[in-house]
């Protein structure tokens, strides 16, 4: 699971790099995108991610031979380092929004996020994301034997 977390972060970095490779958005669009990031709870989602990943991170560290105290301390240090990067996360997120949406779409998103339905969506995002992660873990456990069965006897292509 920690590998999935790291892969997600790498994907985010890759998307951010792609965003930087594009023509920079106008300052007006970037301002709209920053507003959408704030309204969407981007910073809270960023910090909540570390809290949600805590058991997986600690379990991974323990599986690598760390003591419980050392794994907990490493998690705390990792959380502190992630917290320091929150402003950068928000800016990279705003840049991604600015590159993905038009000015009008950003205006419409901000308007929706100010509504009770938009706020309810934001309030429930962490719970929904957690449920989706649990669903993925359940499905992963269920398909693991099928994958193992299908891979049994597989011979990779011979390359000279």
Image (cartoon, rainbow, N blue to C red):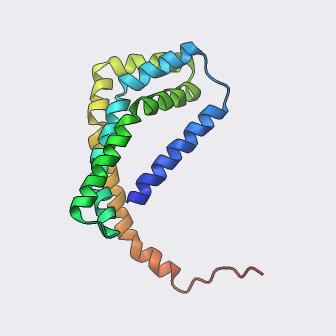
Of all residues, the one furthest to the left in this rendering is 69
Name above or below for residue 6 compared with residue 96.
Answer: below
- Closer to the camera, 102 or 18? 18
Q: Quadrant of the N terminus?
A: bottom left
- Closer to the camera, 49 or 113? 49
Name above or below for residue 81 compared with residue 59.
Answer: above
Point out residue 20 in the picture as x, y percentages from the top left corner.
62, 32
- Name the quadrant containing residue 115: top left
Q: Quadrant of the C terminus?
A: bottom right
Of all residues, the one furthest to the bottom in this rendering is 153
Residue displayed at 43% across by 59% down: 3
Residue displayed at 42% across by 29% down: 87
Point out residue 124 in the picture as x, y percentages from the top left corner.
27, 36
Residue 71 seen in this snapshot = yes
Residue 131 seen in this snapshot = no
Point out residue 156 in the picture as x, y percentages from the top left corner.
64, 80
Point out residue 39 in the picture as x, y percentages from the top left corner.
36, 22
Residue displayed at 29% across by 40% down: 48
Q: Is residue 66 left or right of residue 19?
A: left
Residue displayed at 37% across by 35% down: 84
- Closer to the camera, 146 or 61? 61
- Name the quadrant containing residue 21: top right
Q: Is residue 53 left or right of residue 34?
A: left
């Amino acid at each position: 699971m920690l590998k999935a977390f790291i892969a997600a972060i790498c994907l985010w970095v890759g998307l951010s790099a792609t965003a930087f490779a594009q023509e920079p958005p106008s300052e007006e669009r970037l301002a709209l995108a920053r507003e959408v990031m704030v309204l969407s709870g981007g910073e809270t989602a960023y910090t909540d991610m570390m809290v949600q990943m805590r058991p997986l991170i600690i379990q991974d560290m323990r599986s690598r031979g760390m003591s419980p105290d050392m794994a907990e301390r490493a998690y705390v240090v990792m959380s502190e380092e992630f917290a320091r990067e929150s402003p950068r996360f928000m800016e990279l997120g705003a840049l991604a929004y600015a590159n993905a949406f038009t000015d009008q779409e950003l205006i419409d998103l901000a308007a929706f996020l100010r509504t009770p339905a938009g706020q309810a969506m934001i309030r429930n995002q962490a719970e929904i994301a957690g449920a989706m992660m649990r669903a993925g873990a359940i499905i992963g456990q269920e398909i693991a034997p099928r994958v193992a069965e299908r891979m049994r006897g597989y011979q990779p292509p011979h390359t000279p």
